[in-house]
Amino acid sequence: MAKSAGPGGSHELGQNFLVDPSVIGAFVQLVAPTEGPIVEIGPGDGALTLPLSRYGRPLTAVEVDPRRAERLSRRTPDNVTVVRSDILRHRLPREPHVIVGNVPFHLTTPIVRRLLASDHWHTCVLLVQWEVARRRAGVGGATMLTAHWWPWYEFALHGRVPARAFRPVPSVDGGLLTAYRRERPLVVAAERADYQDFVKRVFTGPGRGLPEILGRAGAFGPARASAWLRQEEVPARALPKDLTAHQWAALWELARKWGRPLN
């Protein structure tokens, strides 16, 4: 069992709690236009839970720390259910819902991966490490994880959260990130596994620019790749991280039409 968490959070559980009212307000405002039940990751002492509860919507707060879960359950109104559970194992609702949370920084990647692979939620509002938020939103270039999921989700960055907004103060800043499930995916769900394998091959393929990378990754020849890049007004020396969501979807369609077998 984890040690009891003091006011500043349990180091063992990676807890850095929000204490800045302006950040809490900005977070709650991002949730305001959404609809449906809310699932909160790691509510801690309720810095987000309590203001979100005022919307009157069903809210399930998933807290791994048993003492904090018990303490919070005594402070919340009837529309809030505090569950002592690990979000990486917790069964998410099967009806449309919203995911929110100040995500433990050391668990950001596994939690985000788990959420992106989950069905039914339509909006995520998350506070994560600043660099993770930037990469997920494609600022300064997309990562392979972002490219993997872009056809099905839109990511947006809503600002930097200074480390001093947390207690205890972490070594890095945070960032407000939203993810919205696309109403019209850019790639059909049945092709997800093949598309993601294609993205991995391109991101990890050797080469000094996309024409060479695509050829060596077994997608299609450098000449056809160069022609497509000119059409999209993408520099020949561009790398996989430089493509947009719609360009990845278009490139996948081209690979399906002209590419060599990827298996």
Image (tube, rainbow, N blue to C red):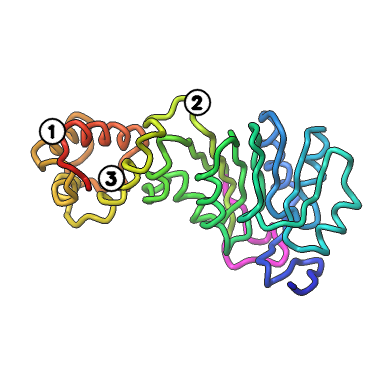
- Does label 1 or label 3 sit earlier along the sequence? 3
> For mark 3, what is the residue?
198
> For mark 1, what is the residue?
227
Residue nearest the observer in this picture, 66 or 203? 66
Q: Position of residue 102 (x, y in %)?
A: 66, 52
- Does label 2 or label 1 sit earlier along the sequence? 2
Residue 241 appears left or right of 115: left
Separation of marks 3 and 2 at Cα, in angstroms: 23 Å
Magenta stretch in the rendered image = 159-172
246 is higher (above) or lower (below) than 2:
above
Residue type, mark 2 in image: Glu
Q: Position of residue 208 (x, y in %)?
A: 17, 54
Q: Residues within 10 Å of mark 1 (few under 14, many from 20)?
A: few
Q: Which mark is residue 66?
A: none
Q: Position of residue 24 (x, y in %)?
A: 73, 46
18 is higher (above) or lower (below) than 146:
below
